Amino acid sequence: MTSVADVMDALEQRFPLDLAEDWDVNGLTVGRPDGEVTRALFAVDPTMAVVQEAIEAECDLIVTHHPLLLRGVTTVHAGTPKGAVIHALIEHGIALYNAHTNADHAGTGVAEALAEALGVSGALPLVPLRDDAEQGTGRIGRLDAPVTLGEFARRAADVLPDTAHGVRVAGELDGAVQTVAVVGGAGDSFLAAAREAGADVYLTADLRHHPASDAREAALLGDGRPYLVDVAHYASEWLWLDAAAEFVGDATGIDTLVSTLNTDPWTARF
């Protein structure tokens, strides 16, 4: 029998908890460590739609990137969004586990999957951890050959899941790029790091107007780089799921599935 604890051990071997930020929440949110697991669903967000997907697929465990209870709550009654998810999980015997910033920082995690999908080779952390140069925030590396910014943005659109957000670009579309920096999830706090690391283009999510504008103004004082590519938060982290699910399946022998749901909150763009 494979237990929830066995799956937790596998995940924490690949994404050690000590890599997480101090403010973060990671680990088992719902379920018993000694509960049996035969099938697990991997998803970005612990939404009710994902829970329903797990119920229909007869899963015993959901593994998400984002935590359900990142901020404090005072009630989990079934009339609240968080409470409804927790009640549905318990009523159907489904455990919930998440790996968030530990998976962001791990060398085998979110940023590495994003870099690989974009064709970036030799990637190293954009911001290494102080005591481990192989782990840290984001990745920076090089494409095998230069491409235009427009071609790179199209590549991103092709490898990432479709979202209403799409792929936004700041910079000259015919500008050449080869050194690429990426951060999965919200990455505008690393704009300066991408510039200082010599990136030709920086791809991340949730770029706000003022930080992006300031970064472009700073870039234009030089050669105009790094260009910026802004994608949906969900899309930037989705690519990690396949590798995580494959690893857990191989390590524990359980069936693993990757959610097919788009959990980006935006549904249309005009």
Image (cartoon, grey):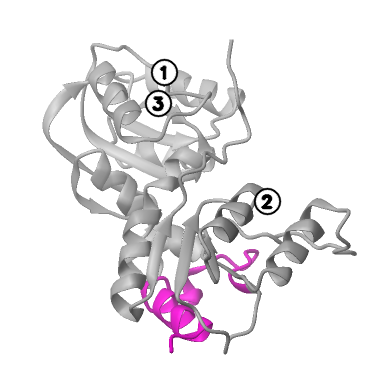
Q: Which residue is mark 2?
A: 48
> Element under label 1?
strand
Reading the chain from its start, which is encountered first: label 3 or label 1?
Answer: 1
Cα distance between the residues tagged 2 and 3 = 33 Å
* Vertical placement of residue 198 versus 173, above or below: below
- Whether residues under marks 2 and 3 lie with C-beta atoms below 8 angstroms apart, the answer is no
Q: Is residue 201 left or right of residue 148?
A: right
The disc labelled 3 sits on which kind of residue? Leu
Front residue of 162 and 142:
162
Most distant residue in the left direction:
145
What x and y, as percent, mark residue 135? Answer: 35, 64
Q: Are marks 3 and 1 in contact (CB under 8 Å)?
A: yes
Residue 120 placed where, x, y %?
Answer: 21, 42
Contact between marks 2 and 1 (CB within 8 A): the answer is no
Q: Is residue 144 shown above or below 241? A: above
Label 2's element?
helix
For label 2, count other residues whose C-alpha is less than 10 Å away and answer few (under 14), some (14-19) or many (20+). some
- Whether residue 254 can be seen here: yes
Is residue 52 rendered to the left or right of residue 145? right
Disc on the earlier residue, 2 or 1 = 2
